[in-house]
Amino acid sequence: MPGGGQDASELPYGNIVALNEHAAVLHYTELGRKAPQPLRSFLIDAGASAHGYASDITRTYAAHGHDEFAAMIEAVDAAQQQMCAAVRAGFDYKHLHIDAHLSLMGVLKDFGVITVSPQTALETGVSAAFFPHGIGHLIGLQVHDVAGFAAGEHGGRVERPAGHPYLRMTRALEPGMVVTIEPGLYFIDMLLDEVKAAGHGDSINWDRVDFFRPYGGIRIEDEVLCTEGEADNLTRPEFAAANG
């Protein structure tokens, strides 16, 4: 906060700071006074305001020595950058969300967490247990900016696709829009229990879930400007500059 010249009351939203299994809570807001031991993972979802506009950025880190979780973070990061590059004028944001499910399930397949294909995981609802939120949202004067479901400038509504109730935008992308791209993978017991109850427990390697559960989850989020041409990632250059 000091680096942004703002205090907590000026931030666009209450920042999310989660260690270890708490990263599985999508909007974790508990404020502990002591870091857990051992430290395995760190998720931070934070933003600042500039000239009335909000930012919303998330990163996930693995503690030293937790190499397999670090590798999963790298895999999600690589997938996320491909999703960011897909932000193009005319591209349907709903399709970007579905593509994100398939890409993330590919990561879980590679790490031995699911035993079925990404397409099967999507069709059976298994993917929603690991990626239970939308790919992102419009951002601007508000963190979750308005008109994400507008069919056009004269009104109307574009509904969410079946099975994806938490998607915050269903429009085709237009030049000038800024959207967040924030894929995530989480190990949430309540949602995984629902997979078992639905009869799809054999789609998951539960030993691998047990291995990754103590890390909570992964989310990586950038803000991307839609242009007439290539996507303009507003976040990555600033991180690169800050890291020297």
Image: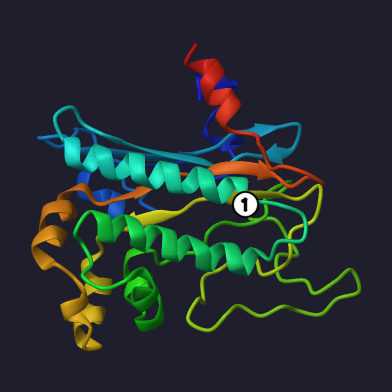
Residue 166 place in picture, x, y as percent: 51, 71
Residue 141 place in picture, x, y as percent: 74, 46
Residue located at (56% from left, 56% from top): 136
Q: Is residue 92 above or below residue 197?
A: above
Residue 55 place in picture, x, y as percent: 61, 39
Place residue 197 in its image quadrant: bottom left
The residue lying toward the viewer, choosing from 27 and 57, is 57
Residue 32 visible in this rendered orientation of the protein? no
Q: Is residue 135 above or below residue 233?
A: below
Residue located at (67% from left, 55% from top): 138
Place residue 93 in its image quadrant: bottom right
In this rendering, the count of numbered labels is: 1
Residue 189 appears left or right of 140: left
Q: Could you tell me which secondary element the residue under label 1 belongs to?
A: loop
The residue lying toward the viewer, choosing from 175 and 30, is 175
Residue 210 appears left or right of 105: left
Residue farthest to the right, as pictured = 154
The residue lying toward the viewer, choosing from 97 and 79, is 79
Residue located at (53% from left, 59% from top): 135
Type of amino acid under label 1: Ala
Q: Is residue 203 above or below residue 58?
A: below
Residue 154 appears left or right of 233: right
Residue 148 place in picture, x, y as percent: 70, 65
Place residue 205 in its image quadrant: bottom left
Circle 1 Cα neighbour tier, 10 Å, few/some/many (<14 / 14–19 / ≥20) = some
- The scheme the figure's colours follow is rainbow
Disc 1: which residue? 86
Residue 114 visible in this rendered orientation of the protein? yes
The residue lying toward the viewer, choosing from 29 and 9, is 29
